[in-house]
Image: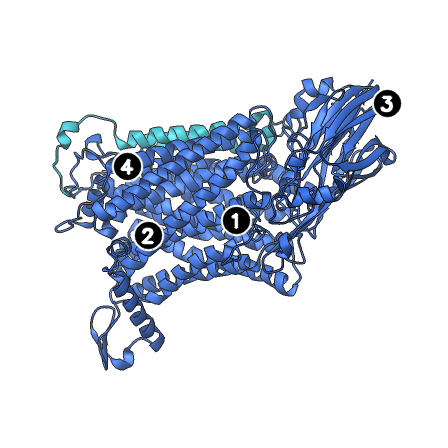
Chain colours: A cyan, B blue
Amino acid sequence: MNASSGTVAEARSKGVSPFAVFGVATVIAAGWAIYQMVAWASVPSFGSSAWPTTIGIMIALGVFFVLALAGPPND
Amino acid sequence: MVESEGRGRSLDDTGAVVPVFEQPPLIVRFLDSTEEEIRKRIARLKLVDRLFLLERDWLTRITMLMILLSLLWGAIGGFDAFGSRTQVSAWALGQPLHLSNQEVYSSITLHGVRMLFGFAQQLEFALFGLLAINAIGVAARHKWVLYGSVILINLSMIMMEGPVYLLPTFNDNYFPAVGWYFLAPLGIQNNSSYVASPLWYLGWIFLCVSAIMWGAWVLSHVAGWLRAPGAGTRGRQLPAFLLFIIGAAILIPICYATLLTSTLWDLGAFLWNWPLNSLANQVLFWMFGHGIVYILFLIPVTAYYLLIPILARRPIYSYRAAFTAAVFFVILTPVLAIHHLYLTPVPSWSVWLSMVLTFAIILPSAITFFSVWMTVKGVKASEWEWNTVSLFLLLSFAGSIAGGLTGPDNNTPSWDVDLHNTLFIVSHFHTLTVISITAGGMALAYAFFPVLVGRFWYSPLLSRIHFAGTAVGGAGMVLFWDYLGNEGILRRTLLVPSAGPIPMYELGLTVSIVIILVAQLFFLLNVLLTLFKGAIVSAEGLQFGEVVRACAQSTYPRPTVSVKEHPLPRQVPRARRERIEVAWVGSVVALLIVVIAVTTPAALSTSDDISAAQSAPAGAVYVTMAGQQYYWSVTETGPVQGHFDNVVVADAGEWVSVNATASGATQGLYIPFRSEPTVNVQVVPGFVSHALFQAPSTPGVYGVPDGEYDGPWFGQDVAALVVLPASGDPSDLSAFTSGDGAGDMYNPPVWSANGTQLVGDQEGLFDHWVPAPTLYAPAGAIGFSWSVPMSSLGIDNYLVNVTTDDPNGQTDWVAAHNDTIPATFGVYRIDPSAGLVPLTTGPLRVGATVPMSLDLSSGVYLYGVTTPVAYSYDPNGQSSSSTGSQSGWVMGLWGVLWVGP
């Protein structure tokens, strides 16, 4: 391992940014969590007990993505 | 470093010569010299020298010792998981079991404590200690405090296992089968039928002392650093990640102090019969039990705040937001205990307050995820490398979000009724502990292990296989646990219903666990190869961030990104970045207020319904349930009258008002309906819990498992709700079977009675079911048979109360007693006005097929051994208050005979 191995970053000028990759990971993880919640919808008590929490999380995720995309970069 | 240097003077931590009267105490000098002698001798073994870094400074040596020991406990804990998992999936797939109930349940217990404390907690101590000392740049002091902490945490793991026999003879009773944790009064002598060894409690006390010592050790360095000259200007210089390490060092003494208090109380009750308030004791325990999750969650949080800025080559998006998150984590973590006790009869105001505070802890997590993600905004693809460190960070980040977002589900008390006792909780928990916490710990390990040992990672390929296996296996685990939880399957149970998709899910779960365990072998192999064959790290001329990037890059097969630091002139003013953070925090706070407001009425009513009897509609049946280890003693008044064991009888659609107590362990009245509202209350000894529910409108036999783990016969502890036709007219079970029995997976299957041959199995059940299959026949002559084969008798079978190391002990005993077990097999009519009316009874014969021929009118009957069988586990007289003991009353060989028109 060369600690200061060569800088050929220019050769990889294109590609998916880490911000986009973390965003996709967040979508998958949050989607899985939402799926877990909604999967309980067949239980009769789900409606009154679970929808407020589930909808609250869905809205929060929407705000999360909107603000992150709208926010300035870390430059 | 403290080293003796002859008489009259010595070296202090900084290497300066100090007068003899400032030398460390005699005991410290003695320990130093002893350690030095030992070190010199064992360092002659090159393998040991290299493995334990014996030539390095004491902080590095101890850190390495902790890492190696944490990996050792992790490996043993993984083996525990494998052992118990193979048995659960074997049962689901109809295969024989090879471990006893005690061994399976203690494997679950020891898996929990070894993974959480021996592995994760110790790894956190190692990494956080090293990072904290280096971050604040002070000389490490108080070596023997740290050594003491290391010794005690590892000793605690050994003690929790129970007595260690130099010449072991058969007795698996001393293993603690008490759940992953321990909830009073289970395990406490004079309070429970299942008694753990007192070493279990002493082990926890050792663990508490170890953790408190470690916290004090870190905080003493921070305090010393703050007192040093120039400290007044240093507050602003604390790196963001260090805030969370200090947060952990503050939280650890606070949370472990509550654990110490509850454990001392338990031990006092165990040894000196102190009075025990189980509910108060459980609240104390959960102040720790919840706190430990957040203490360990600070591992990935620290990894994000430390490593992502380093890999992105830019500071954290908002330092103020990070500071706010750290403060909120510390304030809120110790006060969330009661959200684990929502279904117990705690005051409803405490449930509401816990719900609010638990929702509030979403805030620091929300800040963290936003700040960390925004930190990489603006980083180009060409500036970023997907090495194993960044891959594990990504996995951990996703795991934290997936696991974190399912936390609010549990925190909604009226929803917790559906979730609390199911494997959904295990899915949520392992999303956090494995995909979030362990993956975050792995990111730190991949980044700093080379720094610690001075060698780059040997094999990028092995590290990537490790990552891939962890990601795939981890995702599979939480997926299948979630599926099982959705079906209402209990957590912590060995005996799962073998019906519907359950066997397939169990198989998928076991395969996933095997994948993740095998993946860890690649990590261990890479660790060993790195220690002995890794290229030497040359940090000369490199800044800290450059060294970390170089170490991370050694896990990447074809590095293309320079590790060099380059200045980042700020183009976006802080105010702009903070504005967006404030907008995010404000949105979260507003949403939390709305959700809390909307959720509050249901939360309060859920709690009120458990802690006080609600007015039952006219015509309700009143049921008094006394939970024993391991059955419910049931007395009914109202439209149904009589006494039953493990059976609740109600008419279709009738309201059922339950008044429940328990002894020996916390129990749970759990009816996992899916097309009717789930019934779920926890019953804590010394307190009364209440439930008011409407029986299904379809007559049939519904499974009612005990929702709370209460000892090694937990799997057999399943009752039945027998719903009779409301009109009193005879009915068949076609509506019940076509309606899927309200979706309760614990419903015993319905078999045609005529011609059926019931066969006892090794767990003392008929055909793997408890209750046994419901036999249906039209009125008239009915014929079926049953048998308890001699081959089904063994140490797992409660029916033969003989515990011995002789593999033929049980069968020999039966043979010597005319092939008869002292229990009665009978058929009884359920009479709603009188209880059980015996029709025929006889001895429980072993080995023979016993035909049953009856001429019955339509109605509902019980068959089998319908009263509990006394059980006492005492192999060769080895059970005692020092090794542990267990007894109880077990039911398993019984079912319902339904005779239609």
Task: Pick whichever, A64 or B869, lies toward us.
Answer: B869
| Mark 1 or mark 3: whose residue is earlier in sequence | 1
Mark 3, residue position: B855
Q: Is mark 2 on a helix, strand or loop?
A: helix
Look at label 1 and name its amino acid. Answer: Leu
Residue pictured at 22% horizontal, 36% vertical:
B556
**Residue B304, position as x, y percentages in the image:** 32, 43
The residue type indicated by label 3 comes to Asp
Residue to which mark 2 is pinned: B127
Quarter the C terminus of chain A occupies: top left
Crowd class of label 1 (few under 14; some 14 to 19; many from 20; radius 10 Å): many
- Left or right of B615? Residue B59 is left
Q: Nearer the viewer, residue B197 or B578?
A: B197
Rate crowding at label 4 as few (under 14), some (14 to 19) or many (20 or more) other CA atoms within 10 Å: many
Query: Along the polypeptide, which appears first: circle 2 or circle 4?
Result: 2
N-terminal label among 2 and 1: 2
Q: In terms of image quadrants, where is residue B45?
A: bottom left
Q: Kindly indicate whether the residues beneath marks 3 and 4 are on one polypeptide chain.
A: yes
Chain containing mark 4: B
Q: Can residue B608 be seen in this view?
A: no
Write down the quadrant of residue B832 in the picture: top right
